[in-house]
Amino acid sequence: QVQLVESGGGSVQAGGSLRLSCAASGNTGSVNCMGWFRQNPGKEREGVARISRATGRTYYAGSVQGRFTISRDNANNTVYLQMTSLQPEDQAIYYCAARPSCPLGATMRQTTYTYWGQGTQVTVSS
């Protein structure tokens, strides 16, 4: 089992920045792929970014490319999501997720992720 705990959410004005953290514990050696998803009420959970803990290879959704940066600190089993130039459409609950390995394709399907955090709210005001 792997436990994921997100932190760093909050409220910012449009154009501002936030950094989310996801601390993993438990059998962390069983998960090599860490991702961030986001969700608004009544909408599907959307993949935002993912990173391979082993290689550092990343993937970004087109909507955040160039504004968000995912990174990892393997020594501390933590993954970060640096978000800049935030817009009201970025407002959502952000979830950290993990799976054994990262896929080769350019997709992020929530059903393929095994472990999930509880989520952290990001609010962006215009």
Image (cartoon, rainbow, N blue to C red):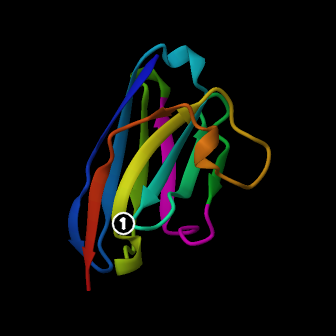
Q: Residue at x 49, y 39 (%)?
A: 97
- Mark 1 residue type: Pro
Residue depicted at 34% across the width and 42% down the height: 21
Left or right of residue 53, residue 57 in this image: right
Residue 90 figure quarter: bottom left
The residue carrying mark 1 is: 41
Most extreme residue toward the right is 104
Who is closer to the viewer here, 39 or 24? 39
Which quarter of the image is occupied by the C terminus? bottom left
In which quarter of the view is residue 91 placed?
A: bottom left
Q: Which residues are magenta?
A: 61-73
Q: Position of residue 86 (x, y in %)?
A: 37, 73
Residue 33 to residue 106: above or below: above
Residue drawn at point x = 64 percent, y = 26 percent: 100
Q: Report the side of 3 relative to 122 (left or right).
A: right
121 within the magenta span:
no
Classify 109 as above or below 23: below
Image coordinates of residue 120 in percent, x first then y, are 29, 50
In-front residue for pair 117/57: 117
Callout 1: SS = loop
